[in-house]
Image (cartoon, helix red, strand yellow):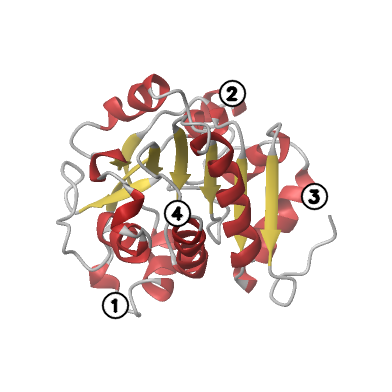
């Protein structure tokens, strides 16, 4: 899964970077992406890619109070994660620029979507899927709370995390310590995610089987299953580990 995913990201990026064009790559975090990022950096380094025009746009950043991002040295900081898992692995000679690494700011989330649009939109958005079917931190909502169309139009914003997501992140990324998991996050909205030219979803946990099966069974978007919106994206790919997840697509 990681090797195939890294190859897709590399090939898509190099199509534009090799022509001297900017490539806007939407990034996700979590254990699913660790090996992929190591392989992606190795691919860029091996071909001596010019990364000066690579711009990255992360899905999320945590907040302790809903008003400001967690410090960069917070154990679960996504800024920290990306620098450790990807950016620090780029050969400095590749020219990746720190100012081209973007994260939604809980202090001003409303500036993120216009910045993405001004940059030309996302060329490719890398995604994981929560055990409850969320993408980024766009949590499930009932259809009597929000319409299908309104959910798809949600912008980048700050929101409290659901108890289910807090428990998931406690187990997967916080080593079982719930106190480490912030209760708020700035998250990329459904609108910029769905506006990406390409979307790539990776899955490798058994717990992701149920929401993925529900997406296939449903066949149409519903706010109760945010990832279901991807199924009708014009250029969407799903890569999963068949030894952990059994699907009939």
In the image shown, does 3 or 110 lie closer to the viewer? 3
Determine the residue positioned at 69% across, 36% down. 235
Q: Secondary structure at mark 1?
A: loop
- Alpha carbon separation for disc pair 2 and 3: 20 Å
**Looking at the image, which is closer to me, 205 or 27?**
27
Lower position in the chain sequence, tag 4 or tag 2: 4
Mark 3 Cα-neighbour bin, 10 Å: few <14, some 14–19, many ≥20: few
Residue 225 lies, in percent from the top left, at 61, 46
Tell whether label 1 touches label 2 (CB within 8 Å).
no
Q: Which element is circle 3 on? A: helix
Residue linked to disc 4: 48
Q: Earlier in the sequence, mark 4 or mark 3?
A: 4
| Helix, strand or loop status at disc 2 | helix
- The residue carrying mark 1 is 177
Q: Which mark is residue 217?
A: 3
Q: Residue furthest right?
A: 248
Spatial separation of the CA atoms under disc 3 and disc 1: 35 Å
In the picture, the disc for residue 149 is 2
Instruction: Characterize the local packing of mark 4: few (<14), some (14-19) or many (20 or more) Cα atoms within 10 angstroms.
Output: some
């Amino acid at each position: 899964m990681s090797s195939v995913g890294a190859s897709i990201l590399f090939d898509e990026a190099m199509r534009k970077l090799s022509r001297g064009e900017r490539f806007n790559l939407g990034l996700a975090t979590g254990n699913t992406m660790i090996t992929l990022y190591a392989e992606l950096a190795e691919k860029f380094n091996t071909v001596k890619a010019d990364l000066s025009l690579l711009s990255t746009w992360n899905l999320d950043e945590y907040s302790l109070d809903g008003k400001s991002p967690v410090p960069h040295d917070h154990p679960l900081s996504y800024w920290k994660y990306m620098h450790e898992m990807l950016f620090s692995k780029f050969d400095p000679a590749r020219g990746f620029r720190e100012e081209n690494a973007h994260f939604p700011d809980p202090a001003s989330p409303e500036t993120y979507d216009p910045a993405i649009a001004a940059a030309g939109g996302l060329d490719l958005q890398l995604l994981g899927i929560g055990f409850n079917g969320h993408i980024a931190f766009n949590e499930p909502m009932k259809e009597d709370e929000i319409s299908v169309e309104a959910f798809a139009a949600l912008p980048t914003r700050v929101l409290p995390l659901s108890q289910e997501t807090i428990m998931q992140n406690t187990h997967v990324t916080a080593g079982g310590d719930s106190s480490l998991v912030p209760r708020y996050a700035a998250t990329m909205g459904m609108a910029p995610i769905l506006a990406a030219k390409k979307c790539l979803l990776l899955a490798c946990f058994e717990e992701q089987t149920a929401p993925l099966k529900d997406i296939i069974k449903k066949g149409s978007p519903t706010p109760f299953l945010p990832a279901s919106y991807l199924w009708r994206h014009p250029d969407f790919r799903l890569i999963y580990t068949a030894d952990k997840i059994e699907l009939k697509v």
